[in-house]
Amino acid sequence: MTETLIKNADIVLTMDDARSELKGADVLIRDGVIAEIGQGLETQGVTVHAKGRIVTPGLVNTHHHLYQTLTRAVPGAQDALLFGWLQRLYPIWSRFGPEEMFISAQVGLAELALSGCTLTSDHLYLYPNGSRLDDTIAAAQQVGLRFHATRGAMSIGESDGGLPPDALVEDEKAILEDSIRVIDAFHDPNPGAMVRVGVAPCSPFSVSRDLMRDAAILARDKGVMMHTHLAENDEDIAYSLEKFGCRPGQYAEDLGWTGDDVWHAHCVKLDGQEIDLFARSRTGVAHCPCSNCRLGSGIAPVREMRDAGVNVGLGVDGSASNDIGNLIGEARQTLLLQRVKNGADAMSAREALEIATRGGAQVLGRDDCGQIAVGKRADIAIWDAQTVENAGSWDPAAMVLAGPQKVRDLFVEGRQIVADGQLATIDLGATIRRQNDLAQRLAN
Ligand SMILES: [Zn+2]
């Protein structure tokens, strides 16, 4: 039996069903699970003193392309719209191999962990030069984050009227076979799972209608979740209307891509009927506000979605379209964007934090994560309440509105991943040096 006691926190923002906020509270972790919450708790194990700290559930990232940390701020892709941006980056990505996938994932996961994230999904949809989903899963196991890897795919290359170069697309039969392989090898359906696998064709404009449908059948046969990009910007809607004769929501519904086992990234352009469809079908949305700003895609109707009952989580999206992989920063950006669109009372800091924690957990089908309550997994972030960023505040909401944007300590399944602001699991300095060597090779 291993125990860790988080002792005497200034406040614990639990995000439990009552949204309890507990002053001067202790949280006792036993064998990876939250065992007790209260005051005056004792342990024979490790004690982490939390006076001057704010304790929250670990943040949940519902959309990322970890490999893109190797193509941040690429010249020629800094100022482009989605389709032009992709065409600039595809040739660079086609030179990636297993080491690029592994190192870039470690960098992205470390960046997420330092911003308070304990559970992340990843959407890997290209496999050049022998790369495999296994490379990113190995990276996550070393860094120590809870990881939902999705087996992405592209199958319609330039010669078939698609956007990606032919060298980056795969045969559809091979995609389905490899999806089965990685699900069988890595997917853990049990509560407390550290690795789950999902099925994730890249987007309706990079795979066929058949693959969308077959992927959904496969996912349901295997009991895994499904993920793709949907309704990201105006070009995306125009493409759907022209090629499929319908809006993206209709296309998704026709091919089995709605339900509580499905989540779609972006959904910036969903209309009222599509929002109703997602609410009725319990389809989840990964909201990526910084990426949407960076690519000029628009402001997603998060207020409308939440009011209609749609499950919404946050995503940093890949570092080629956001550049920063800081998840608590996305919570702040979510609130700011909804206020630009709907006014200053459109979203509170506490609601943004709720979307970033239990909202994301719900989108990923993890009712065992995303809140601090007895019996839930011990995924916990501890924030310093005495930094220069938040000095002068007396409401914990300051952690979303002001900062800090880096966590002090982080626990995943009760294991300490970040200690005193430093990653405790891998040699981050060495990883960054290797990443920069690889980036330099790509630049040349
Ligand atoms: Zn994306």
Image: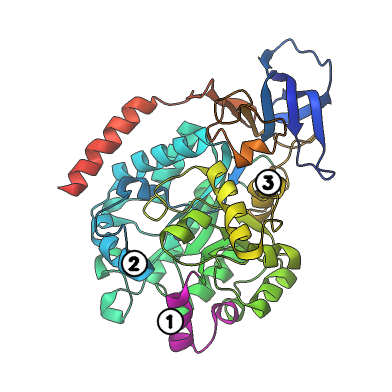
Q: Which quadrant holds residue 400?
A: top right
Under 8 Å from ligand 1: the CB of mark 1? Answer: no
Q: Residue 342 location in percent, x, y?
A: 65, 64
Give the magenta range.
232-251
27, 173: nearer the viewer: 27
Quarter of the image that includes the N terminus: top right
Which residue corresponds to mark 3?
349
Which residue corresponds to mark 1?
239
Q: Is 384 drawn above or below residue 104 in the view shown?
A: above
Residue shown at 59%/60% (left/top)?
340
Kind of residue at disc 2: Glu
Kind of residue at disc 3: Ala
178, 98: nearer the viewer: 98
Question: Callout 3 environment at 10 Å: few (<14), some (14 to 19), or many (20+)?
Answer: some
Circle 2 or circle 1, nearest the eye: 1
Which residue corresponds to mark 2?
170
Dominant secondary structure of the residues highlighted in magenta in the image: helix
User: For the residue labelled by badge 2, is the local secondary structure a helix, a strand or a loop?
Assistant: loop
Question: Callout 1 environment at 10 Å: few (<14), some (14 to 19), or many (20+)?
Answer: some
Q: Do the residues labelled 2 and 3 touch (CB within 8 Å)?
A: no
192, 109: nearer the viewer: 109
